[in-house]
Amino acid sequence: MRGNRSDMFRPGGAMKRFAATLVAVAMCGTAWGAVTPFNTNNPADLTSFLSGATVIDFESSSLGGLSCGLVTPPSNACSPQALASYTNTTNGTIPVGEAAQLSFFNNVAGGVFTDSGGGTPQALPLSNPGNPVALLQLGGTIPATDAHSGTNVAGPMLNRSSSTDPYALDLDSFVEIHFVGGNVNRVGMWLNPSLSNVLFIAFDQNGLSLSTINAGLAGNFVGVQSDANNIRSVSVFGGVNGFTFDDLTIGQIGGTSNGGGTVSEPSMLLLLSMGVGLLLAGTSRRTYRA
């Protein structure tokens, strides 16, 4: 025990290592930021979330900034595919036309990429974009309220494991949203009230989970908001009846991002360095006596 105590306070000992760890943890905590989950159907809860954010409603006003098709990266105009019922929407048997295969939002935060699995869409330029997401126009026997605004929504397609698999609707699969143009601090969406709950996970640029919503309720706005631009992607997994989403909402602190988290405030780093410096100076002059 005596040897361990001496090591704690001698120069270069455990106290110095502890102080260095303290600085690293404090700096990482500032860069990561606190993350708040949202799982609500009350618009009043979203006031700060919506302030300064971009909302993609998949209607005519948004379509001009979206890209669909099989080219890499997608650059073709989008046209939603009509969907009159939810029959067979979870078994990969309904083909989705190329004009409704949504992949890239070129009007948001320098570039936002969506996929239904496969590929490696982590950065620009895109070389392996993966499986697209379906752009759908709800109608027929589907309730009008299943789209949060207008009639158009987005939903997952079949996670194709080979080139022979069809480009087909598979609403009980999953959707990934990658902010390839730079990190954001908030992202959320309105879920279809007639379909299933979802699992919603936000990740940083290193692929580490920032926040998980285990039961994003059908009909709710589900998303996360951080106090730093540290969200690089989100994954949304559907239940047995699948899901669609509308009014995808994306925002950044300051309207820009640095592509790799945030930098700690100079004042915080100064205080940390001063405090730890004093700690080390004090311990270097101390001699422990058993």
Image: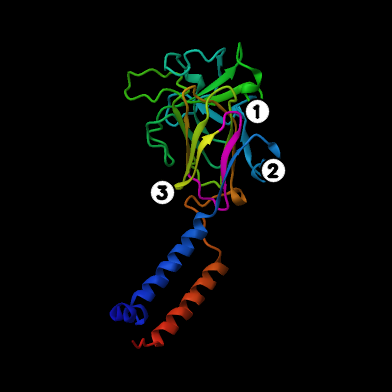
Q: How is the image coloured?
A: rainbow
Mark 2 vs mark 1: give the one in front. Answer: 2
The foreground one among 82 and 78 is: 82
Prevailing secondary structure of the magenta residues: loop
The crowding category of the residue bearing disc 2, from other C-alpha atoms within 10 Å (few below 14, some 14 to 19, many at least 20), is few
Residue 4, how many percent across, how many down?
31, 77
Query: Circle 1 sits on which residue?
Result: 61
Q: Is residue 231 magenta?
A: yes
Q: Is residue 282 visible?
A: yes
Q: Amino acid at mark 2?
A: Thr
Q: Which residues are magenta?
A: 217-232
Q: Kindly indicate the quadrant of the structure image that contains residue 141.
A: top right
Q: Amino acid at mark 1?
A: Ser
Quadrant, the N terminus: bottom left
Query: Circle 2 sits on which residue?
Result: 47
Looking at the image, residue 242 lies above or below residue 213? above
Residue 280, how many percent across, how many down?
43, 80
Task: State which tag comes first along the sequence, 3 or 2.
Answer: 2
Q: CA distance from mark 3 to mark 1?
A: 34 Å
Q: Is residue 163 magenta?
A: no
Residue 245, how many percent across, how many down?
56, 28
The crowding category of the residue bearing disc 3, from other C-alpha atoms within 10 Å (few below 14, some 14 to 19, many at least 20), is few
* Tag of residue 206: 3
Q: Amino acid at mark 3?
A: Asn
